[in-house]
Image (tube, rainbow, N blue to C red):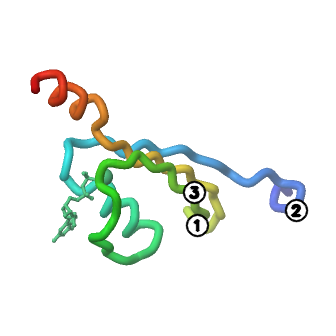
Amino acid sequence: MTDSGPSRKMSRAKLVILGRENCGKTALCVRFITKRFIGEYDHKKEVTYRCRKTVDKEPIDLEILDTANKVLSKDKEAKN
Ligand SMILES: Nc1nc2c(ncn2[C@@H]2O[C@H](COP(=O)(O)OP(=O)(O)O)[C@@H](O)[C@H]2O)c(=O)[nH]1
Ligand SMILES: [Mg+2]
C-alpha cells in the first residue's frame, strides 16, 4: 500500500487518565510528555495536553485528558 505520502492523514488518539486523587496521574502525564518529573503544578486543574509521539515508527497526534477528581471534591464540599 502506498499510504505514506504527504496527503496521508496523521493518526490521532485520545487518552483519558483516570485514578484516585494523588495517585500520580499528572506526574505521569507530565513525565510522558516532557520526560521529566516535575512536582510543581496546579493539582486541582483538569488539563488536556496535546503532543506528537512516535508509536510503532509512526507519528501520532495525542490528546491526553488528565482528570482532576472534580466529582469527589464536590462530594467533600457537600458533606461540609
Ligand atoms: N517520589 C515520587 N512522587 C510522585 C511520583 N508520582 C507522583 N508523585 C507525587 O505524588 C503526588 C501526587 O501526584 P499527582 O501527579 O499530583 O497526582 P494526581 O492527583 O493523580 O494527579 C505529588 O506530590 C507528586 O509529586 C513518583 O513516581 N515518585
Ligand atoms: Mg492531577
| Amino acid, disc 3 | Arg
| Amino acid, disc 1 | Thr
Front: mark 3 or 2: 3
State which quadrant residue 74 falls in. top left
Separation (CA) of disc 2 from disc 1: 17 Å
Rendering coords of residue 75 (x, y %): 19, 25
Q: Is residue 60 left or right of residue 41?
A: right
| Depth order, front residue of 18/13 | 18
Q: Circle 1 sits on which residue?
A: 54
Separation (CA) of disc 3 from disc 2: 22 Å
Rendering coords of residue 25 (x, y %): 30, 53
State which quadrant residue 31 falls in. bottom left
Query: Which residue occupies 30% across, 63% down?
Result: 27
Separation (CA) of disc 1 from disc 3: 13 Å
Label 1 CA crowd tier, 10 Å (few <14, some 14–19, many 20+): few
Marking on residue 6: 2
- In the picture shown, does residue 74 fall above or below 58? above
Q: Circle 3 sits on which residue?
A: 50
Rendering coords of residue 60 (x, y %): 63, 58
* Secondary structure of residue under mark 3: strand
Q: Is residue 63 left or right of residue 40?
A: right
Instruction: Answer yes or no: is residue 56 visible.
Output: no
* Secondary structure of residue under mark 2: loop
- Residue contact at pointers 2 and 1, CB within 8 angstroms: no
Furthest toward the top, the residue is 78
